[in-house]
Every structure is written in C-alpha cells, then in structure tokens.
Amino acid sequence: DAGVTQSPTHLIKTRGQQVTLRCSPKSGHDTVSWYQQALGQGPQFIFQYYEEEERQRGNFPDRFSGHQFPNYSSELNVNALLLGDSALYLCASSLIQTKQYFGPGTRLTVT
Amino acid sequence: GQQVMQIPQYQHVQEGEDFTTYCNSSTTLSNIQWYKQRPGGHPVFLIQLVKSGEVKKQKRLTFQFGEAKKNSSLHITATQTTDVGTYFCAGNGGSSNTGKLIFGQGTTLQVKP
C-alpha cells in the first residue's frame, strides 16, 4: 500500500516563473492538504481540497492555486515566483476530518 | 488569527535524560496532534488528543491535553539517540475538526550519547 507520493523531489526555478507540484494521496484517502515549510519553521497551511473543491485556505496570496482530480490526486501551482517562496512543500492526505499523512515533500528553490 | 506557540525551540540532553516540550494555543482547540520530523524528512504523525485532560502514552512518550483544550505537552522519558528530531504540535481550531492544522514552530531535540 503506497503512502503519499509527491513529485518532483527537488526543483530549481527563477524569480517570476511558474511551478506545478504534484501529489498522489494514500490509497483510500479523499482529502489533500498542502503546506509550506520554510527552513527552521513549522509547516504553514496553504489550502485543502476535498471532492475536487478548495474547502479551506490559509493566508497565502492568489499566486498559490490548486486543483484536485477525480482520482483524488492534486496539484499545487505557484505563479510569479518570489525568492521567499523557496521552501519545502508538503502534501498531506486523509479521509475528511481524520489524521493527516504527509508525503516526503518537494524542495523548491527560487533563484 | 489562531496561533500555536511551542517552547523551547531547542533542547540538548544527555542520553538517558528526560525531555519535555510545551504547546500553547491562542484559542480553544477541537483536538491537537503531535508530529515528529527527522532531519531531512517529513512530519510523521505520532498521536491525536481530543478530550479535555486526556493523557496518552506510547512507550517512553507521554502526551497530555490541557483541561481548557488550549495547551498540550509531550514528555519523553530516558531519551535515546533515536529520539533526535523536531517535534511539532498542530492544533485543529475551533469547535469542529476542520482538518486545517496550525503548527507550532517545533522543538528540536538533540541527544548526546
């Protein structure tokens, strides 16, 4: 039984570019949440998807957007990248309102 | 907005010593979760506390949820080098379990053999 998977593992982008990160939830899970973890900090909630809709959102600008597909996998898109967007992006899957299982993350570096 | 504070930020202990990290929320929580993150790794779920005053044990780890459901603690007895990592508490805010976790800054534990 595969756990949460994320791709790519690492990514280097230039300021102003756009990036798409991908997440496949644990088998049987229907909810995907995305978090941003800056170095030395705790993860910060970006948004949560359930039934292909954004159900909740944290304090992140509209440059951050997402999508959930019918197979429950999800994408996180970030437009107009800033240096401050450099972080580990974590995807967590769950059944709605239960404990969350985190994936290994995507390390994004913006230069 | 809701904030979750965690202290201390760092703790260095000698192997065999005890360790405690404390978590305080600015608002009442529906539940609190604890995660461990090893260096270079991702957060791994340890436990969830739901009831006021709840205490749960996992081997050498003891987790408590305060009576007011605004604070929590994790205590490790007789630390081992395998306990090294950063421990995060994460609160689920409000009166319902929304699934939106607000993480503390974490406590990084170093254990000297």
Image (cartoon, coloured by chain):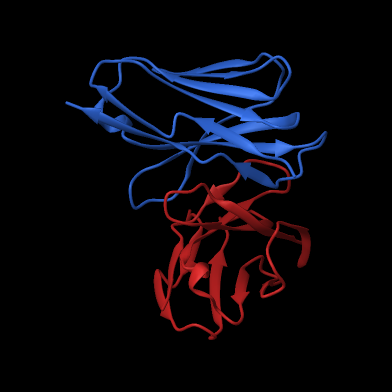
Chain colours: A red, B blue
- Nearest to the observer: residue A1 or residue B64: B64
Farthest right residue in view: B95
User: Image point 64% across, 23% down: which residue?
Assistant: B71
The image quadrant where one finds the C terminus of chain B is: top left
The image quadrant where one finds the N terminus of chain B is: top right
- Nearest to the observer: residue A70 or residue B76: B76
User: Image point 61% across, 71% down: which residue?
Assistant: A76
Q: Is residue B69 above or below residue A12?
A: above
Farthest left residue in view: B113
Residue A82 lies left or right of residue A40; in this view the side is right
User: Image point 52% across, 69% down: which residue?
Assistant: A85
- Nearest to the observer: residue A81 or residue B98: A81
Provide residue A8's location: percent of width, then percent of height: 43, 73
Instruction: Tell me which corner region of the image, top left, top right, bottom left or bottom right, holds residue A97.
Output: top right
Provide residue B25's location: percent of width, then percent of height: 67, 31
Provide residue B107's location: percent of width, then percent of height: 43, 34
Q: Is residue A79 above or below residue B14?
A: below
Q: Is residue B112 above or below residue A104?
A: above
Provide residue B64's location: percent of width, then percent of height: 58, 18
Residue B39 lies left or right of residue B106; in this view the side is left
Instruction: Tell me which corner region of the image, top left, top right, bottom left or bottom right, holds residue B69.
Output: top right
User: Image point 75% across, 32% down: which residue?
Assistant: B27
Total label count?
0
